[in-house]
Image (cartoon, rainbow, N blue to C red):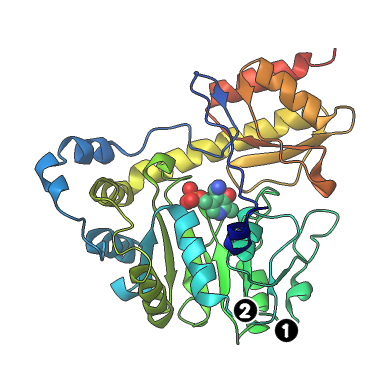
Amino acid sequence: MKAFEKNIRKVEPYVPGEQPKRQVIKLNTNENPYPPAPGVSKALMQMDVDRMRLYPDPTASDLVHTLAEYYHVQDEQVFVGVGSDDVLAMCFLTFFNSDQPILFPDITYSFYKVWAELYRIPYECPAVNDEFRIVKEDYYKANGGVIFPNPNAPTSIYENLEFIEDILQHNQDVIVIVDEAYVDFAGRSAIELIDRYENLLVVQTFSKARSMAGMRIGYAIGNATLIKYLNDAKYSFNSYTMNQTSLACGVEAVVDKAYFEEHVSKIKDTREWTKKELAKLGFSFPDSQANFIFATHEKYDAKELFEALKAADIYVRYLGGERIKNYLRITVGTKEEMETLIAFLANYNR
Ligand code: PMP
């Protein structure tokens, strides 16, 4: 080992899902199968290339204001970043500085562990129960902060606002982050609780329900004081996280509420259809309230099935890990894509 190695921060990175160059049925990274709202392509065509000489608006004020109006909050209650990964990383850096461990479920978004390791934040992972549900009482003990997705990923399970409030009631001295990447496919958002809990931050993304994973836009909504701390950290890191194109396109995606609702509802319909078909084929899965289904089959080895699907150009996600080694996470695509998947599965191992 070279002497300088000892001063290098070594991390085991998060492993993102594959982005194949070829055209495949892509059900592996929870993207939206539909294009973004039509206003987004108009905004793109109207981009003024000459303006690219200039730095973007560091406050991202148009996008912040559009989101604030949409959620009926003040501009000071909105923070935006380069996908919710950027927002969440900034939250870990800003809010999780206790000697006590932060808490997040053992089966959850695997990036939480990576950020905790990167920033050297102590953490504990209470086990979800046998049905993969978060046990809220596990979060009632002393801790340095709490974070969980709702719906949880990859389990797809959504908990109601009473559940979230119970956790908030027992954690008033630390920051509680609810990662709502998939909430639009589920139910009510915890945003309606931010006025009552000044320690609550709700994080959302444009990557799923708004069909803009490639643009990288995420945001946090909460008490203005928390948002100020987040902005202070951002300006101490990189003032211009969001580029001009993302800012302009993001605004258009938010204002077209009708398009948004129509396509979210299409995906939910396809999800319900897919659940029925998977059940008929003997698969079992938690009752998904997200845009993906976390499925297992007692007769099939999940890793083998993953490989067989891939060989047929149907990409799903195999995450592995002790408790979920026989599960596949299947993104809900278009109805046609799901029909192809179901037809493949119906003929598998016959
Ligand atoms: N949170 C959860 C629970 C996710 O599954 C994802 C998607 N990988 C993200 C956050 C990050 O999404 P993005 O950075 O695209 O907003």
Name the foreground residue: 328 vs 182: 328
The answer to whether 42 appears left or right of 282 in the picture is left
Residue underneath mark 2: 168
Relative image position of residue 175 (x, y in whole percent):
56, 78
Res. 263 image quadrant: top left
Q: Quadrant of residue 143?
A: bottom right
Q: How many marks?
A: 2
Q: Position of residue 223 (x, y in %)?
A: 42, 79
Mark 1 neighbour density, 10 Å: few (under 14) some (14–19) many (20 or more): some
What's the CA distance linking mark 1 and mark 2? 13 Å
User: Which quadrant of the figure contains the C terminus?
Assistant: top right
- Which numbered marker is on residue 142? 1
Q: At label 2, which amino acid type do we have?
A: Leu
Q: Residue at x 77, y 25 (%)?
A: 305
Which is nearer the N-term, disc 1 or disc 2?
A: 1
Against 294, residue 55 (above or below) is below
Marker disc for residue 134: none
Give the vertical position of 112 relative to 95 (above or below). above
Q: Which amino acid is tagged 1?
A: Ala
Position in image of residue 243 (x %, y %): 28, 51
Q: Residue 342 vs residue 52: left or right? A: right
